């Protein structure tokens, strides 16, 4: 009973926020509603017992992709009226693609035999009592240890690449040099100067 | 613990490669002066060392890391070739890189990471490892393509290569997900067994076509060749030299691994695709190269045509002679290409900027007779004039094709290689019989002349090398190892 109520709450919010993504006037609001629908979808994944997918959805989509979206939208200067006109131009195409997707999904739902004969997917692993995260962890850190390391190297290469393509050493930029800062002491930075009384008047000017 | 050690010992060359790359990265980051120079020569020495290591290690067939990596004679020979050609590609760039930016130590390190990806691509034995290795191989290449970041053409080349490369990776990934879904295994042996057990399965054929498209993009054969001329033209010339050599060889050998391994049961499906790709690449590469004025675009089209010739070797399946002739073909192609690029890089129109147009070469024989002579030899070798290496490359390929009954394809290839001879020999005519037009200086770089001399010796004396050195023996053993 309780999970069912939760499911309906989550799905209703997803539908509502998905509609708001399209219909809200401010693009910032659209992105915030998009994030909201992601969070609710994560809730549905949790209800279905796919807690790893839920976490990934929150971390990757909410934490990275949506924030990137927000950045881009805040950086760019949108003219909402123009976008509205563009929307009208592409409306038929969008509706057409939407209709095809809808048809495909309903076909899948109403013809279960599509999964049976020729297009049979052969599963290898039995479902056990372990949670998704535990099963994945067991696999990644034992059987797929080498692949895990490889993924790490790909990330390292991505980092080196980003630095190579964007870091520029300009001579006129003053950079912080921490060891110089720490090694500075009062002797090097404060100079005591004896000023004769007669000079004071000149310095004040 | 013992088990891990037993596995790791077979990956020793990759591990040395990783450690070298990481240590050099640290060295470059903390050493301020001359970092590029040190990193270049150090990685050259390590790669040469690794290539000898790969040949000298006994060629046992082993499957390690839970069947995800396989090491046998074929992978070892291909890896040795990859290391050898990449090491020369690295020292080809020494002078240019130091002129361009003597603190850009990342350049050889990116090449090292790419080489690591290549060596894992060749020995990958399941789809996940293969995909990760492809990504590890191609990510550094995208960065290298746009390495001259202040140059608009270079940035364009990088973006084009990145977008199309990502597209091809996604095609490959989609195909492998279909193959996994409908054969129920990601391991090559498992896929092979399950395909044998199934009757014709349409979904696996779709997956096969997607996987092939992804791989054909990597070797830049015909339906997916469009990126090649732009990327070759835009990138810095030493980077192009690297693009034209090791990645091509790797992708071809990966194609062999997949088509002769897990998908060998679907021969009638992939045979016609490879047949078409090979024919179309030869035709398009040859005819498009005729009208080029930029020398790097010309070499790009010529590499498309050469990939077409090399693919003929794949068609002698299930006979493994074709693999042997393909390996010999690629060996000679690598040597000739590196030699051509060493000539091009050594001729400069301005400080650190090598020649671009074919017309820049006109009349260089008077000023630089040695460079002109070597360039002419490489061009004759590309065209397939005996007794140079290129002739034997084509000879072995066509012999294996005729032995497996591909008479039509052999005649087609022979005719088009005559057409191809036109634009290679035109360069020789320009160098020897035309008047000089642009002022060209020659850079005095030891590493360039070293590469040039090594390649010219290999090409000119190939007929003697093949009688003394065990090239045929090595490639034959590799092909046999693949067959088992």
Image (cartoon, coloured by chain):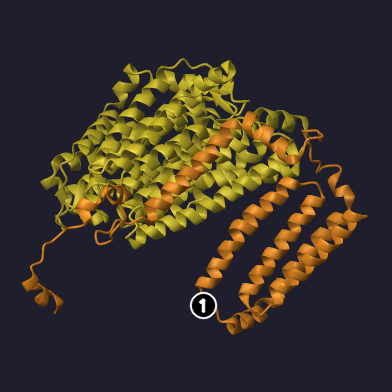
Image point (85%, 58%), residue name: A6
Chain coloured orange: which letter? Answer: A
- The percent position of residue B267, horizontal first and vertical second, equals 65, 35
Q: Quadrant of the N terminus of chain B?
A: top right
**SS at mark 1 in the image:** loop
- Classify residue A8 as left or right of residue B335: right
- Classify residue B208 as left or right of residue B238: right
Local packing at callout 1 (Cα closer than 10 Å; few below 14, some 14-19, many 20+) is few
Question: Chain B, which colour?
Answer: yellow
- The percent position of residue B127, horizontal first and vertical second, equals 62, 37
Asked if residue B247 can be seen in this view, the reply is yes
Image point (67%, 55%), residue name: A58
- Classify residue A52 as left or right of residue B448: right
Residue B248 versus residue B56: which sits nearer the camera?
Answer: B56
- The percent position of residue B139, horizontal first and vertical second, equals 47, 47
- Residue that carries the numbered disc 1 in the rendered image: A77
B233 versus B265 height, above or below: below
């Amino acid at each position: 009973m309780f999970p069912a109520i939760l499911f309906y709450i989550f799905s209703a919010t997803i539908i509502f926020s998905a509609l708001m993504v399209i219909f809200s006037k401010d693009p910032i609001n659209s992105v915030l509603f998009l994030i909201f629908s992601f969070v609710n979808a994560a809730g549905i994944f949790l209800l279905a017992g796919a807690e790893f997918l839920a976490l990934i959805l929150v971390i990757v989509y909410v934490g990275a992709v949506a924030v990137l979206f927000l950045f881009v939208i805040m950086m760019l200067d949108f003219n909402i009226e123009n976008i509205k006109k563009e929307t009208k131009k592409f409306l038929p195409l969008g509706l057409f693609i939407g209709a095809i997707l809808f048809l495909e999904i309903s076909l899948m739902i109403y013809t279960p035999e599509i999964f049976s004969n020729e297009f049979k997917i052969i599963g290898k692993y039995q479902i056990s009592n372990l949670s998704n995260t535990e099963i994945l962890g067991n696999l990644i850190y034992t059987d797929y240890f080498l692949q895990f390391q490889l993924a790490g190297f790909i990330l390292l290469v991505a980092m080196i690449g980003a630095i190579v393509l964007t870091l520029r050493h300009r001579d006129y930029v003053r950079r912080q040099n921490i060891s110089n800062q720490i090694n500075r002491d009062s002797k090097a930075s404060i100079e005591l100067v004896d000023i004769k009384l007669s000079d004071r008047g000149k310095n004040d000017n | 613990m013992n088990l891990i050690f037993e596995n790791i010992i077979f990956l020793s060359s990759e591990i040395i490669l990783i450690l070298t790359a990481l240590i050099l990265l640290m060295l470059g980051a903390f050493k301020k002066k001359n970092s590029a120079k040190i990193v270049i020569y150090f990685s050259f020495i390590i790669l040469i060392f690794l290539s000898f290591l790969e040949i000298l290690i006994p060629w046992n067939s082993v499957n390690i890391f839970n069947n995800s990596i396989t090491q046998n004679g074929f992978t070892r020979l291909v890896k040795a070739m990859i290391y050898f050609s990449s090491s020369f590609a690295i020292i080809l760039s020494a002078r240019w890189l130091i002129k361009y930016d003597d603190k850009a130590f990342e350049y050889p390190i990116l090449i090292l990471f790419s080489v690591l990806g290549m060596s894992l691509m060749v020995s990958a034995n399941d789809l996940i490892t293969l995909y990760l290795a492809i990504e590890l191989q191609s990510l550094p290449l995208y960065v290298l393509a746009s390495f001259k970041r202040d140059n608009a053409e270079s940035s364009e080349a990088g973006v084009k290569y990145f977008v199309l490369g990502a597209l091809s990776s996604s095609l490959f990934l989609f195909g492998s997900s279909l193959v996994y879904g409908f054969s129920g295994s990601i391991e090559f042996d498992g896929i092979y067994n399950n395909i044998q057990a199934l009757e014709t399965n349409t979904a696996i054929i779709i997956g096969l076509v997607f996987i092939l498209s992804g791989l054909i993009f990597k070797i830049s054969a015909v339906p997916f060749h469009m990126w090649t001329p732009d990327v070759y033209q835009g990138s810095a010339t030493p980077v192009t030299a690297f693009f034209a050599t090791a990645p091509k060889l790797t992708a071809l050998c990966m194609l062999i691994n997949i088509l002769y391994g897990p998908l060998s049961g679907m021969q009638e499906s992939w045979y016609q695709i490879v047949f078409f790709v090979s024919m179309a690449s030869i035709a398009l590469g040859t005819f498009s190269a005729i009208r080029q004025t930029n020398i790097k675009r010309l070499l790009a089209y010529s590499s498309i045509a050469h990939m077409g010739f090399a693919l003929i070797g794949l068609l002698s399946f299930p006979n493994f002679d074709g693999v042997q002739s393909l390996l010999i073909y690629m060996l000679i192609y690598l040597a000739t290409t590196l030699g051509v690029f060493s000539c091009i890089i050594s001729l400069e129109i301005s400080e650190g900027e090598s020649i671009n147009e074919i017309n820049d070469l006109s009349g260089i024989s008077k000023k630089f007779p040695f460079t002109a002579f070597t360039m002419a030899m490489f061009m004759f070798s590309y065209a397939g004039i005996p007794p140079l290496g290129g002739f034997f490359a084509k000879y072995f390929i066509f012999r294996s094709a005729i032995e497996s009954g591909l008479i039509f394809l052999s005649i087609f290839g022979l005719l088009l290689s005559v057409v191809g001879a036109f634009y290679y020999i035109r360069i020789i005519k320009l160098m020897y019989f035309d008047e000089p037009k642009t002022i060209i200086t020659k850079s005095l770089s030891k590493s360039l002349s070293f590469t040039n001399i090594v390649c010219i010796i290999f090409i000119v004396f190939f007929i003697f090398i093949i009688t003394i050195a065990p090239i045929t023996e090595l490639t034959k053993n590799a092909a046999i190892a693949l067959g088992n």
